[in-house]
Image (spheres, rainbow, N blue to C red):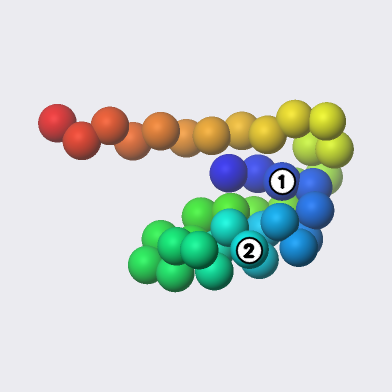
Amino acid sequence: MIYHNTAVVAAANAACPANPVAVVGGGHETHMHFDLNHAT
């Protein structure tokens, strides 16, 4: 997940410490990206 707000990144990664995938990305002030990995 790519966010603009560092506090949101810290909270997202703290909520799931086994898989901390949130990062700060410039140019993402108005939207987010999600990478969904579907188990097969």
Mark 1: amino acid: Tyr
Total label count?
2
The circle drawn on residue 29 is none
Examine the rendered structure and indicate whether residue 25 appears above or below residue 13: above
Q: Residue 37, percent across and down?
A: 33, 36
Question: What residue is rendered at 85% in x and 38% in y?
Answer: 29
Position of 37 compared to 5: left or right?
left
Examine the rendered structure and indicate whether residue 19 appears above or below residue 37: below
The circle drawn on residue 3 is 1
Q: Quadrant of the N terminus?
A: top right
Q: Secondary structure at mark 2?
A: helix
Mark 2: amino acid: Ala
Where on the picture, by quarter, is residue 33? top right
Question: What residue is rendered at 37% in x and 67% in y?
Answer: 18
Where on the picture, by quarter, is residue 11? bottom right
Observer-side mark, 1 or 2, equals 2
Question: What residue is rendered at 68% in x and 34% in y?
Answer: 32
Q: Pointer 2: what residue?
A: 11
Asked if residue 17 can be seen in this view, the reply is yes
Decide which of tag 1 and tag 2 comes sooner along the chain: 1
Q: CA distance from mark 1 to mark 2?
A: 11 Å
Q: Secondary structure at mark 1?
A: strand
Crowd around label 1: few <14 · some 14–19 · many ≥20 (10 Å): many
Q: Residue 38, percent across and down?
A: 28, 32
Q: Nearer the viewer, residue 35 or 12?
A: 12
Position of 7 compared to 15: left or right?
right
Q: Residue 17, percent across and down?
A: 44, 69
- Considering every residue shown, the one lying at the far left of the view is 40
Asked if residue 27 can be seen in this view, the reply is no
